[in-house]
Each structure stands twice: as structure tokens, then as C-alpha cells.
Image (tube, rainbow, N blue to C red):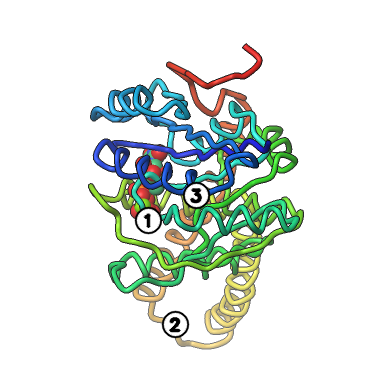
Amino acid sequence: MKKISIIVPCFNEKENLFYLNQKLQEVFLNQPKEKYSFRIVFINDGSSDDTLLEIKELKRQSSNIDFISFSRNFGHQQAIKAGIDCVDADAIITMDADMQHPPHLIPELIEKWEEGFDIVNSKRFDSKNQSFMKKLTSRSFYALLNKLSYVKIESGTADFRLLDKKVIEQLRNLNEQNLFFRGVIPWLGFNQYTIDYYPDERRFGKTKYTAQKMISLAITGITSFSIKPLRISIFVGLFLSVIAIFYMLYALYIGFFTDRAIAGWTSVIVSVLFIGGLQLLMLGILGEYIGKIFIENKKRPNYIIDQIDIFDENK
Ligand code: UDP
Ligand code: MG
């Protein structure tokens, strides 16, 4: 009997859980009973609505539900990490609570796992019902990310995937605060397969990824997988220095060997502002990396668990 756990991070997803649970249970029923035992693990990521109450209510109705509840909002990636750390299973499937990751794909994920793949990823086609802004931001994010980082991260990969036990064990050893699974997974290697799907529309509620969270995830994605932004500063600096040297020679020549003088104000103010802006930008990039060192160095836990109720057959 193989144990499969579905990990669902939830941040203010009260309305979605009932329906999601129903759909998941249907999927489980259609799988051979003697082969798999399924459990759902909801990770309540510091919701401010009644998500936790709803989870407990569902747990009363179905015997195969577990939950972890954080002491506050720690973020989607940390919620996934908590599931990976705390759940004992032969395979884990991570998915969103909002029905954008269709449960009917789960049998396909399992099939590929049975064929011998250790990681079964999913990749969404651009859907018609995605807003133009979301499409644009997500595409430019992946384009930039792939330009800047050393691992190849495909556009449209989502945190809907199956992980084999041996991958889970590796992931448990990763204690970085700035977790970005979409980058870590290709970095891990192993035998991977990717399934394409059309995402559904979020069933209830709004996206929990505010612009601020998205930018923060994008910066984490770039800075935890590459130091190319730092390299770029070196090259931009070199390039500007070369130009400056030539201009200096020219200015000295005009000053000492001719009676003319270079008209001043415009060129001075333009270069001061340009260089000033550039320097602040590069300092910001540097600061971003130093900040990461600072945070990682404290070795604080990735998340804090307030309540946990996970079935353990050994107990
Ligand atoms: N989520 C979370 N903590 C957060 C933000 C999001 O646990 O701080 C969960 C959310 O409940 C959902 C999943 O992560 O199950 C993906 O979030 P969402 O659907 O809002 O993102 P989108 O699909 O719009 O990218
Ligand atoms: Mg969503």
C-alpha cells in the first residue's frame, strides 16, 4: 500500500475548501483502494478568516484529513515546506486550494510516478481567462529569471507537482529562508516529467498573491539562484568608466590646449544624476544579497506551527 499525501497551502480560502475536498475525495474513490491510501494535509498559513474552522469541520466529516496551522502568515512556499517536513508519505502532491490546479490531473501525476519519475511537474498553458496583466507579468518574470539565473525554469510551471519520497528527503535538508520551489526543483535533478494543463479559474475569492508578494517572490527567485545581477554591475561600471576616461581626456585636451571651454551645466547635471541613480540601483542589488546573508545567517525556522494534527499510524 502506497501512501500519498496532498498538501494544500491555504491563506483565507474558507469558501474553496469544501468544494476542493469534495473533488479530491472523488478522485481518491476512483483509484484502486488496495494500492493507495490518500490523505489531505491542509496548511493554514495564518488565515484571518475562518479557514481553520472550516478545515476542522471537514476533518470531522472525512477521516483522511490532517492539518497544520501556522502562528501567522509565513507565505505559500513556507507552507509547502512545512508539509514536506511534517508529512510521512511515499509521495506528496502539492496543489493550490483555489481549484486552479485541477484535481482530475492527480491520476495522471500518479501514473507518471509509477512509470518511474521522481518528480512530476505540471505546466499550465496560458489560459484565456487569465487577466492580461497576470499573463504579462508572469511572462516577463520568467523571461528575466531565465536570463539571470543558472537553472532553467520554464514559464508557466506552478507549484502543482508530485514528489517522490527520495525527493522529499532531499528537500527536508534545505533550510534556506528564501525558498523558491520553482527554482529548487529543476536544480535538484532526478528523473523529472512535466504534464501540461489548462488552469481553471479561481473558484472563490481573489488571488492571495498581491503585487507586493509577487515582486518579492520574483526577487527571491532571481537572487537565490544567481549572482548575475552583481556581475552586471561590474560590467556596467567598467563600461561607464571607459566612457568617462575618454571624456576626461577630451575635456583635459580642450581645457589645456585650446581657448574654448566645454559648456558645463547640462553635461554635469546629466552625468551626476545618471551615475547617482545607477549607483543607488547597484547598491540596492548589493543590499539585496547582503540582506539575504543577514536573514539566512540568523537560522530562524522557516515557519512556526501553532497547531498540528497529522495522522500517525505508529501511534
Ligand atoms: N497562499 C498561502 N500563503 C500566502 C499566499 C497564498 O498559503 O501568503 C496559498 C493560497 O491559499 C493558494 C496558493 O497559495 O492555495 C496560491 O495562491 P493564489 O491562488 O492566491 O496565487 P495565484 O494562483 O493567483 O498565483
Ligand atoms: Mg490561484
Q: Which residue is mark 3?
A: 30
- Please rate how many residues cluster around mark 1, counting C-alpha atoms within 10 Å: few if below 14, some from 14 to 19, many from 20: some
Q: Which residue is mark 1?
A: 100
What amino acid is found at the position of numbered circle 1 in the picture? Gln
> Relative to 315, does residue 156 appear above or below in the rendering?
below
Count of marks, rendered view: 3
The label nearer to you, 2 versus 3, is: 3
Does the residue tagged 1 have its C-beta within 8 Å of any atom of ligand 2? yes
The label nearer to you, 1 versus 2, is: 1
- Please rate how many residues cluster around mark 2, counting C-alpha atoms within 10 Å: few if below 14, some from 14 to 19, many from 20: few
Q: Which residue is mark 2?
A: 261
Q: What residue lies at 34% left-to-right and 64% top-to-bottom?
A: 134
- Residue 37 on image: x %, y %: 58, 36
- Please rate how many residues cluster around mark 3, counting C-alpha atoms within 10 Å: few if below 14, some from 14 to 19, many from 20: few
What amino acid is found at the position of numbered circle 2 in the picture? Ala
Label 1 sits on a secondary structure element that is loop
Does the residue tagged 3 have its C-beta within 8 Å of any atom of ligand 1? no
What amino acid is found at the position of numbered circle 3 in the picture? Asn
Residue 286, visible in the rendered structure: yes
Contact check, label 2 and label 3, Cβ < 8 Å = no
- Looking at the picture, tell me which residue is in the foreground, 45 or 264: 45
The label nearer to you, 1 versus 3, is: 3
The tag on residue 8 is none
Does the residue tagged 2 have its C-beta within 8 Å of any atom of ligand 1? no
Ligand 1 sits in quadrant: top left
